[in-house]
Amino acid sequence: MGMKWLKSTECLSFEVGDNVARITLNRPDKRNALSALTLRELHQALLEADDRRDVNVILLSGVGKDFCAGYDLTDSYGGKADDAADYDPAAYRTRADTLDDDIWHLERQQDLTAIMLDLHKPIVAKVHGNCLAGGTDLAFSCDIVLAADDAKIGFPAARANGTPPTNLWFYHCGPQWAKRMLFTGDTISGLDAAKIGLVLEAYPADEIDAQADEMARRIGSVDAEILATHKRVVNMQMELAGARQSLRYAAELDARAHLSQGPRRAQFRKDMAEKGLKEALANRDAPFGDGRVRLRARAIAPE
């Protein structure tokens, strides 16, 4: 059967074949960081896949070394300035000058990815390399997350920049692990992430492609209408547990965190202004060493 349809845009590629829509982030030079344009293109690709009768399941992945290294900080947290200013910026919420403006921008950004929860068709994330900050917002909005053993998963920005604006950690790994990861901004390997339920399963790096393809094939062998009933009933159970309301709350709290006057937040802003992104990140992360969670082996008690 093979490939049936393929389209490439500036930031991603979209391939349809054998009931699977393969949406692939394609900014390897930026480690697939999320710009405003990337988010808009992804939003449209997801809607396209959900609309097509030849698609039963979506496989989301990234080209190059990483799944997604986060939001593009050089793009003003999502690219508020990537369009030509052919209007009067002062007449619009061009910049997040106030708390309400920041909340508004985060909610509009969230609109582009929250659609992942509303799609009728299931989404499988294939995570390799870095899956950081905004990358976790994407991955945890999918229905199933598969990871390479050596994938690096976390939200280091929680150390000084804010809280995840699409905060679904609790629903994947429970309250204690969600707090442990966010309190420190540490990262966890794909292998250990599978042990705590943050991802469904992890595989050796040279097997992740085949395993994700097989998962998509198996899911895609079920009619789209049946898959939609399964996805929507489980997502309704998540909503009854507060998932949808928590997304809006997370965006508001992220905006409040941006106003923090604490010394680490202030230092990060100063470093960004005076020394640039690379040194700002290095100084932010220095107290945490390699920042990696390592699970201790647990002995099984004899019967």
Image (cartoon, rainbow, N blue to C red):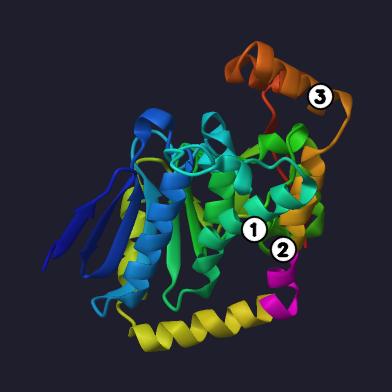
Asked if disc 2 and disc 1 are in contact, CB closer than 8 Å, the reply is yes
Regarding residue 187, the answer to whether it shows in the image is: yes
Name the mark on residue 248.
2
The verdict on residue 244 being magenta is: yes
Does 287 appear above or below 249?
above
Q: Is residue 127 located in the magenta-colored stretch of the structure?
A: no
Asked whether 303 or 28 is in front, the reply is 28
Visible residue check, residue 127: no
Q: Is residue 216 above or below residue 13?
A: below
How busy is the neighbourhood of tag 1: few (under 14 within 10 Å), some, or many (20 plus)?
many
Q: Secondary structure at mark 3?
A: helix
- Dot 1 or dot 3, earlier in sequence: 1
Q: Residue 79 location, x and y as percent? A: 51, 40
For the residues carrying marks 2 and 1, which lies nearer the camera in this image?
1
Measuring 78% from the left and 36% from the top, which residue is drawn there?
184
Instruction: Give the residue displayed 54% in from the left and 42% down from the top.
Output: 88
Amino acid type, residue under disc 2 in the picture: Arg
Q: Residues within 10 Å of mark 3 (few under 14, many from 20)?
A: some
Sooner in the amino-acid sequence: mark 2 or mark 1: 1
Q: Which residue is mark 1?
A: 107
| Label 2 – label 3 distance at C-alpha | 26 Å
Which residue range is magenta in the image? 239-247
Q: How many marks?
A: 3
**Secondary structure of residue under mark 2:** helix
- The residue under label 3 is 266
Is residue 109 toward the left or the right of residue 287 in the image? left
